[in-house]
Amino acid sequence: MTKTSFGKMPDGQSIDLYTLINRQGIKVTITNYGGRVVSLFAPDRAGRVADVVLGFDDLSGYLAQNPYFGALVGRYANRIANGEFKLEGTEYHVPQNDGPNALHGGIRGFDKRVWTARDVSKENPSLELTYLSKDGEEGYPGNLSVKVIYSLTDNNELQIDYTATTDKDTVLNLTNHSYFNLAGQGNGNILNHQLTINADRFTPINSTLIPTGELRPVDGTPFDFRQPAAIGARINDDNEQLKFGKGYDHNFVVNHKGTGLVLTARVRDPESGRVMEVLTTQPGVQLYTGNFLDGTIHGKGGKVYGYRSALCLETQHFPNSPNQPNFPFAELKPGKTFQETTVYRFPATQ
Ligand code: BGC
């Protein structure tokens, strides 16, 4: 693993960029600013690699406004309705930074924090990032100690292991918010990408993108990705859910049998033949199709990031779980360890 300088924070603190390379020559770079995946090179059907994630060439791009490119998101990824929840009878208020709701951990969530990095490579290059989120930070209770390990395996897998402990009851939802375009970052939109999602149900939303609490079967809806379908095939259908999301911006209920990693999604760019598989232990995955990208952001190498020029598959606990008793538990108690794993795999041959 190598470490280079990525820039300086406004207060002068130096930020680094770590490069992980596996024996296949696949390369991933990660910065300790927000624990962000900055670049990820994946092979096409002929073995030619392209950088498949959106991002910036240096820290200054990330310090300017950007929609969570590559970031570790927390303390509570996605939305909490009206920025409020109750724990053990106490009501908590967190910043409403997305209309009436809280989004992605607040004004300065984990994506905007400086993490402590350590090379923990064994057989594979592995980068450990730790962050202590203090009691009351962005309104959330408890000193939360978070550890994320990024490893790059020889099967072209970027594995992300999340663990966390707290000293007070808190709510917790951690994800990685990489934006993928398998044709290469900044190379057109993702509407022709073929997507499969291993989910029989999804969580429909209201007009502010908060799940209603229903677990709705995907049968006969544009949310049925159990067989591969082009992302663009139904995205503009006359469907209330797609209108609320301005496209896909929904949580799917991953079909899990017991515990452990499960193949959750597969994406294929028919042109290049590049494939990404997503495996996770988490109960949900947010499909977000870059509906808010509008060409105003210029990213790596000056590439313009247009409308729907990337997709996110954010493995997660369901949005607004703290206010939905029928959703899987998203609380962490003292003495317990939060543990989840997600793998993004880029098979060499298809
Ligand atoms: C949310 C979108 C949001 C995007 C970028 C996704 O997780 O569901 O609504 O626009 O993140 O912030």
Image: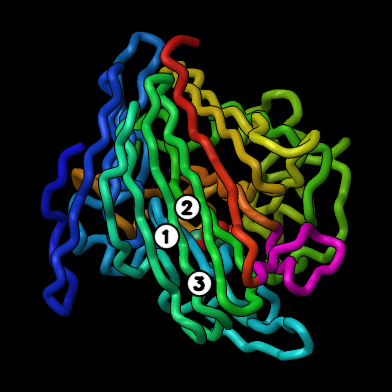
Disc 1 marks a residue whose amino acid type is: Tyr
Q: Residue furthest front?
A: 335
Q: Which residue is mark 2?
A: 177
Disc 2 marks a residue whose amino acid type is: His
Disc 3 marks a residue whose amino acid type is: Leu
Q: Which residue is mark 1?
A: 68
How many tags in the picture? 3
Badge 2 crowding class, 10 Å Cα cut-off, few under 14, some 14 to 19, many 20 or more, is many
Q: Residue at x 84, y 63 (%)?
A: 213
- Depth check, front residue: 212 or 347: 347
Q: Residue at x 26, y 29 (%)?
A: 21
**CB under 8 Å between callouts 2 and 1?**
yes
Q: Quadrant of ligand 1?
A: bottom right
Q: Which residue is mark 3?
A: 144
Most frequent secondary structure within the magenta stretch: loop
Q: Residue at x 72, y 46 (%)?
A: 252
Dot 2 or dot 1: first in sequence order is 1
Alpha carbon of mark 2 to alpha carbon of mark 1: how far?
Answer: 6 Å
Q: Is residue 168 left or right of residue 14?
A: right
- Depth check, front residue: 90 or 298: 90
Image coordinates of residue 57 in percent, x first then y, are: 19, 50
From what the image shows, is residue 133 above or below residue 35? below
Report if the beta carbon of the residue with label 2 is closer than 8 angstroms to ligand 1.
Answer: yes
**CB under 8 Å between callouts 3 and 1?**
no
Judge whether residue 330 is colored magenta: yes
Where are the magenta residues, as a range? 318-333
Disc 3 element: strand
Quadrant of image for the N terminus? top left
From what the image shows, is residue 315 above or below residue 245? above
